[in-house]
Image (cartoon, rainbow, N blue to C red):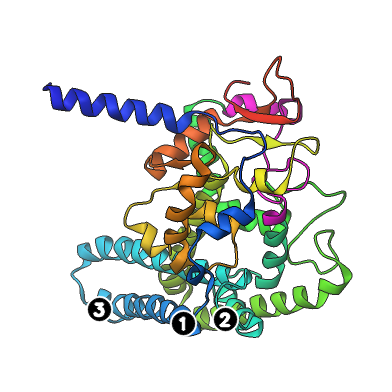
């Protein structure tokens, strides 16, 4: 191995160590106002035309892939179709994940200056992907209000060792992790929506489709009914498509890409909030700014653009969630010098990171002998 190659390996190793070094958990020496002042003012401006251009771009490719698959795949010699469909599923799943991200942006009122436009676009796009728009918008808003809180955060809330289920130790091995990851990627999102799996514990059954569930207040019930109506409308369209074209066609054209969307959604959210360097807090230590900073930016390569940079600008998104995605990269570059060691970016490939985090981020506990017992860190051994 030459000197240059050895130096590259050393630098990579040092970079990895720095990435895994814990971020500070003390009160930051800067304020949210100071961070906002560092960002060019135009980054907070929402353009209706520009936002719709991303919708048009994503939908153009979604319909293009659909047209190619339904019009030409049956003309291919039989063996080639086995290769064509997986390519379609992958491309369509990635594009529809971008559509999902735009609907998510609508839920944050980051799409336009008009709330009714944001909610209309978000309801249509999320319903098309079988997401109850208002229901998730409300719980997701609470996630942003309570990020990093062990008591009040809404999603991927880690457990202390004392609350880990008895069977966990039997899955803390390579086969167990493979099985856990597969179940999480395939079923994690619908299980969260329907049964609040991996979500904040409530005193009774919680479900995103239930207007009378503990997640929602009385004044929010109408919005849950509207979300459910959107899901029923799309379900009826899918049912009609299955009757007309056959269930196998529906699964190939829509079902498998949707599974990929759900898998990416779980992956993105999990990796943004699960990292060996990130703390979680109980009520004695938590505050909003420290919680918002307990997130990580990740690198998905070319998919960063396909996913509208929700992957590599997540810290800025948690600090300023009404900022449109097309300004988030510029904002991230502006605040990084101020954030300093409070900012965490991990360039590890997302599939390697999923395996590492599944192995090393099992539960959270305060450090032994630490002066504060309200700061919890990920541990990897049961």
Instruction: Decide which of tag 1 and tag 2 comes sooner along the chain.
Output: 1
Instruction: Decide which of tag 1 and tag 3 comes sooner along the chain.
Output: 1
Q: Secondary structure at mark 1?
A: helix
Task: Name the mark on residue 121.
Answer: 2
Instruction: Write the residue at 70% across / 19% down.
Output: 370
In the image: residue 20, left or right of residue 115: left
Image: magenta residue range: 143-171
Q: Secondary structure at mark 2?
A: helix
Reply yes or no: does residue 161 show up in magenta: yes
Q: Which residue is mark 3?
A: 72
Question: Which quarter of the figure is the N terminus placed in?
Answer: top left
Q: Check disc 2: other Cα within 10 Å, few if <14, some if 14-19, many if 20+.
A: many
Instruction: Write the residue at 57% across / 81% down.
Output: 121
Whole-Å distance between the Cαs marked 3 and 2? 31 Å
Instruction: Decide which of tag 3 and tag 2 comes sooner along the chain.
Output: 3
Pick whichever, 258 or 330, lies toward us: 330
Q: Secondary structure at mark 3?
A: helix
Where does residue 344 sit, x and y in percent of width and height? 49, 41
Where does residue 343 sit, x and y in percent of width and height? 51, 42
Query: Residue 342: which quarter of the image?
Result: top right
Q: Which residue is mark 1?
A: 52
Regarding residue 312, the answer to whether it shows in the image is no
């Amino acid at each position: 191995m030459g000197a240059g190659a050895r130096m590259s390996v050393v630098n990579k190793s040092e970079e990895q160590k720095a990435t895994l070094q814990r971020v500070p958990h003390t009160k930051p020496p800067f304020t949210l106002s100071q961070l906002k002042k560092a960002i060019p003012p135009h980054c907070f401006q929402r353009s209706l035309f520009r936002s719709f251009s991303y919708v048009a771009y994503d939908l153009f490719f979604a319909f293009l892939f659909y047209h190619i698959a339904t019009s030409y795949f049956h003309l291919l010699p039989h063996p080639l179709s086995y290769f064509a469909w997986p390519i379609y599923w992958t491309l369509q799943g990635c594009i529809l994940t971008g559509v999902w991200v735009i609907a998510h942006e609508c839920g944050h009122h980051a799409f336009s200056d008009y709330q009714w436009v944001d909610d209309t676009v978000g309801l249509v796009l999320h319903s098309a992907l079988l997401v109850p728009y208002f229901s998730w918008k409300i719980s997701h808003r609470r996630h942003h209000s309570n990020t990093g809180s062990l008591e009040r955060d809404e999603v991927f809330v880690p457990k202390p060792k004392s609350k880990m289920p008895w069977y966990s130790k039997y899955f803390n091995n390579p086969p167990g992790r493979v099985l856990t990851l597969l179940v999480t990627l395939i079923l994690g999102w619908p299980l969260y929506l329907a049964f609040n799996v991996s979500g904040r514990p409530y005193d009774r059954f919680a479900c995103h489709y239930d207007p009378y569930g503990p997640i929602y207040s009385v004044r929010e019930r109408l919005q849950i009914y509207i979300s459910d109506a959107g899901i029923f409308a799309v379900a009826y369209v899918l049912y009609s498509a299955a009757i007309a074209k056959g269930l196998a066609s529906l699964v190939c054209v829509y079902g498998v890409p949707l599974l990929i969307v759900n898998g990416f959604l779980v992956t993105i959210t999990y990796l943004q909030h699960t990292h060996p360097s990130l703390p979680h807090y109980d009520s004695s230590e938590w505050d909003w700014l420290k919680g918002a900073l307990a997130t990580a930016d990740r690198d998905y390569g070319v998919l960063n653009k396909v996913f509208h940079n929700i992957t590599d600008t997540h810290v800025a998104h948690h600090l300023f969630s009404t900022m449109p995605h097309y300004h988030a990269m510029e904002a991230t570059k502006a605040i990084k010098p101020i954030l300093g060691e409070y900012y965490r970016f991990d360039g590890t490939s997302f599939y390697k990171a999923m395996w590492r985090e599944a192995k090393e981020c099992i539960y959270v506990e305060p450090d032994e002998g630490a002066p504060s017992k309200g700061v919890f860190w990920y541990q990897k051994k049961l």
